[in-house]
Amino acid sequence: MMQDVWTQLGPTIAAIMFIWTMYQNYFPHELRGHIRRYTDKLVSYFYPYMHIIFYELETDGWFERSKAYVAIERYLSKNSSTQAKRL
């Protein structure tokens, strides 16, 4: 049983790599944007979490937090920290 899985793994990976190469080389950029958008929508149905990155700003050698991050941090700490188990 496990030997069959390992036997099929190589051809499966090769097929995925071939399809990915064809996608990158022959699909127009506009079509890739549409495919990406619909793929993201499909993934969002199965993955309910959101990941947001706020970059720090460097001024005069010091790092400064983003104003958006500070505003969101204040809002969340005031409104949802009592109900949330983990932020």
Image (cartoon, rainbow, N blue to C red):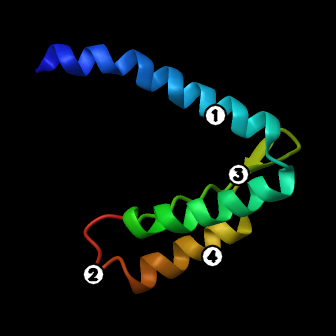
Mark 2 and mark 1: span between their CA atoms?
A: 44 Å
Q: Nearer the viewer, residue 34 or 12?
A: 12
Q: Position of residue 6 (x, y in %)?
A: 26, 15
Give, as a three-letter code, the residue at label 4: Ala
Which residue is labeled 2 in the image?
A: 83
Residue 31, quarter of the rendered image: bottom right
Q: CB under 8 Å between callouts 2 and 4?
A: no
Residue 48, quarter of the rendered image: bottom left
**For mark 1, does the 10 Å Cα neighbourhood hold few (<14), some (14 to 19), or many (20 or more) residues?**
few
Q: Earlier in the sequence, mark 4 or mark 3?
A: 3
Which residue is labeled 1 in the image?
A: 20
Q: Nearer the viewer, mark 1 or mark 4?
A: 1
* Picture disc at residue 55: 3
The residue sitting at 52% across, 27% down in the picture is 15
* Picture disc at residue 71: 4
Q: CB under 8 Å between callouts 1 and 4?
A: no
Q: Earlier in the sequence, mark 2 or mark 4?
A: 4
